[in-house]
Amino acid sequence: MAGAATDPAPRRRRPRRTADHRTTRIEQAADHSAGCPNTPGGRLVFHVFAALAEFIRELIVIGTKEGLAAARARGRVGGRPSVATEEIIRAARDLLPDPGRSITSIAELLGVSPGTLYNHIPDLRDLRAGAVPRQLEAPAR
């Protein structure tokens, strides 16, 4: 072939790297890194990050408590409003000694759940049994 350019010098090829070579390099890098918790440097980094996280958490708790206190000072009360008013609790206390009514029926009549009655009337079981509630008993001498 006349006029054909001669081929350039053949390129040198890098030796192939095997998967074993890559894992060896990774292991060597891990041995010297500060991110490995098995080395003193790695443990130091881990403890520094843990201390920072704990510090930030405490700042959040303090800020939340201060915010709630400021809201209370402005007259704001947090949480879900209670369904049990004084009238409902008083009516439930009047109905509880009646053996013909169950706690569930009393709760349905008053428009609350039985759990609400149990939560707001600590001596509910005593009232149900017809006994004198602990708060009304004469002090023992």
Image (tube, helix red, strand yellow):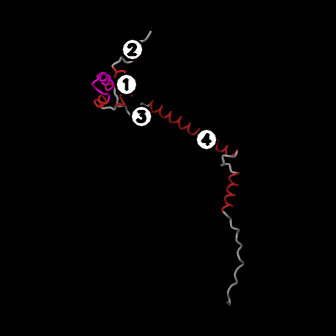
Residue 82 x, y percent position in the rendering: 37, 31
Earlier in the chain: of badge 2 and badge 1, it is 1
In the rendered view, would you say 83 is above or below 16?
above
Residue at which label 2 appears: 137
Which label was assigned to residue 121? Answer: 1
In the rendered view, would you say 77 is above or below 52?
above
Q: Contact, CB < 8 Å: mark 4 with mark 2? A: no
**Looking at numbered disc 2 in the image, what kind of residue is underneath it?**
Glu
Residue at which label 3 appears: 79
Earlier in the chain: of badge 3 and badge 1, it is 3
Earlier in the chain: of badge 2 and badge 3, it is 3
> What distance separates the C-alpha of mark 4 from that of mark 1?
45 Å
**Looking at numbered disc 3 in the image, what kind of residue is underneath it?**
Gly
In the rendered view, would you say 13 is above or below 5?
above
> What distance separates the C-alpha of mark 3 from that of mark 1?
20 Å
| Disc 1: CA contacts within 10 A as few (<14), some (14-19) or many (>=20) | some
Which label was assigned to residue 77? Answer: none
Residue at which label 4 appears: 52
For numbered disc 4, what is the local secondary structure? helix
Q: Residue furthest top?
A: 141
Earlier in the chain: of badge 4 and badge 2, it is 4
Q: Which residues are magenta?
A: 88-103
**Looking at numbered disc 1 in the image, what kind of residue is underneath it?**
Ile
Q: Is residue 101 magenta?
A: yes
For numbered disc 1, what is the local secondary structure? loop
For numbered disc 3, what is the local secondary structure? loop
Residue 31 x, y percent position in the rendering: 70, 51
Select label 3 or label 1 by which is in front. Answer: 1
Relative placement, left or right, of 95 versus 48 is left
Q: Is residue 45 magenta?
A: no
> What distance separates the C-alpha of mark 2 from that of mark 1?
16 Å
